[in-house]
Amino acid sequence: MHHVDTEHTEHTESRDNHPSRRGFLALAAAGGAAAALGGLPAFTASAAPVRPTSSPLLSAAAAARNQLWWQAPGSANSMIRQGLPVGNGRLGALAGNDPAAELLTISDATLWTGGRNDTLQSDGQFPYGRDDFGSLTLLAELTVTIDGHDLGSVDNYRRSLDLAQGLVSASYDLSGVTYQRQIFASRPDDVIVLHFSQQGGGTYTGTVTLAGTHGETTTADSAGRCASFGACLPNGLKYGAAVTARSSSGTVAVDGTSISFRGCMDLTVVVSGGSDYAPDAAAGFRDPSMDPERLARTKVAAAAGHSATTLLHTHVADFRPVFEQLDIDLGTSSAAQRRLDTWQRVQARYRDDVPDPELEAAYLQFGRYLMISGSRGTLPMGLQGPWLDGNDPDWMGDYHTDINVQMNYWMADRAGLSGCFDAFADYCLAQLPSWTDITQRLFNSPANRYRNSSGKLAGWTVAISTNPYGGGGWWWHPAGNAWLCQSLFEHYEYTQDRAYLQKIYPLVKGAVEFWEARLVTTTVTDASGASREVLIADSDWSPEQGPLDAKGITYAQELVWNLFGNYHTATQVLGKDTSYSATIDGLRRRLYLPVVSPRTGWLEEWMSPDNLGETTHRHLSPLIGLFPGDRIRPDDSTPKDILAGATALLTARGMNSYGWSNAWRSLCWARLKNAEKAYQLVVNNLKPSVNGGNGTAPNLFDIMDMGQGRGIFQIDANFGTPSAIIEMLVYSRPGHVELLPALPSAWAASGSVSGVGVRGGFVAGLKWKNGKVTQVTLKSVGGRDTTVVSGGTSRKISLKPGESVTLGTFG
């Protein structure tokens, strides 16, 4: 990902509160082919929400622990840097919180232009534009203007983002009255709610406007209850949105294209919308029965029939248990740090170079908040998730398969959000028929520089960029299938869910079949002069640098080695295809694996002792066996020269890059147990972005420097950096858990974490003091046996699913 030529400058729920896999599969069977392949349609009629019978709200003191806050509203001209995000897993919005003009830029994860894009250009690339490949676009802009509430006239302004309850709030004083607003995106009601209230006898007068961003016309419904629009993109995708408002006092009236309100002591605005996208390739990724505008009207009317308090409680009862699956304490910040607002703290952390452990923990929780808000029951998150400020996101907001979409989901299982991974898995399943068809028709085309030189072809693969319609953009990415399957299989390692493994098995087997046909034989000579025949990947490009055509790139070799190993495990668990699995085992034994260059001392990225690319390149393609793979690790399983070569290459790559790249570097250093370097890269990502520079925006979105003062939002660092924090505290692979493998001095005094996913089917929690583990709890979610290691001491643990054990001090 993240190519930097001028034309393609490149650049991320708790299972206890999510339907079980078995329950989901039963639902899928009842729902037909689309459901069985990749989940239910995103925007659809839903059952009436379960309303809580008591308040699920946290006390003010408890909520403050996971609350970010600012002393100024966001600018309408800088929403991507200053707008606060809300989302219900499908709808996403950025809120500006200006007292006189509340602005929401609203996106729907399925509102994509473009299409299947199944042709190759003469240069072998897939077309990659907003009309052919397509782009994620805005659904609508919602504006609530309030007369007489100009920012310059108010006092004590404050806005906040409550991470634990999924709630944006703002308050200010005007003429002796305290005005308050709350904004949240409810998954149970499938709407976004804005509630305006006050203390002191004040009123609201103004206008609610819902505007499309593609030239749509907003009109009132015949009963005068809501304003809405419906339209169709050039690709045939139907979409619509609707808004309504209510008040217990004053007057509210729908006036054609807007809603007016006057003399209201309170006001509740409800908005919803979506498209007729469906995850079904056979139906052209459309639900022909869908009328999005009508459904949007139905949903806002249904929600508006309940009080704002009921809607809030319903939302929090859904959101809060998911968020609370993981808790983290990295230490106590100073009183002076606590007095600062969130943006001031980010600036102070960089300026003073003093650890702020509560801010660093909050950054992790912010990433989890984004995951819960952006990845439940719909398409997965691409380059920006569902948060846009216009219709032209860089790289179309797509799914890059050479790091972005994978990094987005590294965090899900690690951070107690296994249910949020479903969106990624279901996307791959829904796309598989198209990916297979396009691979079979186009991969061996003479136009494709990466075609199989043998002329053989089987299975499926993808392009570097993918969209929701089975289409690809830019170059073919042969090893992309293996990396997608690595992420998919790792989810099984965390959950030990056999039904899930059965579901993804066609994806894994199809990728294996592709590579069985693609590998070619060559002869290599080792240092002693002995020769042997090995299998290597056909011509490819090491993302995203060096020669465009090179055989046996380390990136592909590592991924295929891992793919074949995972396939072996899958066949053993499922008890199928044992004969074919044995064939693939034989191929795996013959795979060439990288060596250390005698010239550079680095692990080779190409089958060459020379470095053929940029030393400090943003991608860590040759280190994929270190992370996310773990074939290379600092123990006796890895030859010392390979470990030294990987460490030397990582060192050469440097410590300052784009946010997503820093996150990957941090994860690699955590795997090497270098705590201080891993921590420094986390800190580097908390650097405040100035004039479009790399770093963190005021709203904590990660900004990537595109040069000439232009910085863009890319969400993968917001997920990759929290993944690194967790990896510093807990490392796992099936059968092995290591506690505090890379604990930096900044967090060593005392801390705790609970709800961490562990490969092998466990969830871990631990406490530490003075750098030593004082307590660890391990719960089985499907695993049975593992070894827990800390401080040179190891203990073997055997549990039945559902059982847990708590151990005391290690070492």
Image (spheres, grey):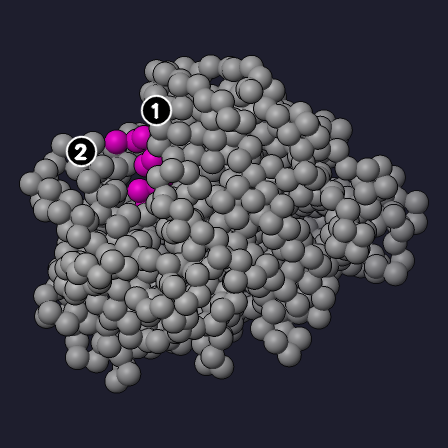
Q: Residue 754 carries which label?
A: none
Residue shown at 60%/62% (left/top)? 656
Which residue bears the numbered disc 1? Answer: 783
Q: Quadrant of residue 249?
A: top right
**Observer able to see residue 85:** no
Q: Which residue lies furthest to the right in this view?
A: 176
Q: Which stretch appears magenta?
A: 488-498
Q: In which quarter of the image is residue 57?
A: top right
Q: In which quarter of the image is the C terminus?
A: top right
Q: Is mark 2 on a helix, strand or loop?
A: helix
Residue shown at 25%/58% (left/top)? 528
Depicted 784 relative to depicted 344: above or below: above
Depicted 96 relative to depicted 197: above or below: below
Residue shown at 56%/15% (left/top)? 808
Depicted 154 relative to depicted 198: above or below: below
Is 377 left, or right, of 663 in this rendering? left
Q: Position of residue 564 (x, y in %)?
A: 22, 47
Q: Position of residue 392 (x, y in %)?
A: 51, 72
Q: Quadrant of the N terminus?
A: bottom left
Amino acid type, residue under disc 2 in the picture: Gln
Amino acid type, residue under disc 1 in the picture: Gly
Q: Which mark is residue 572?
A: 2
Is 758 left, or right, of 194 in this rendering? left
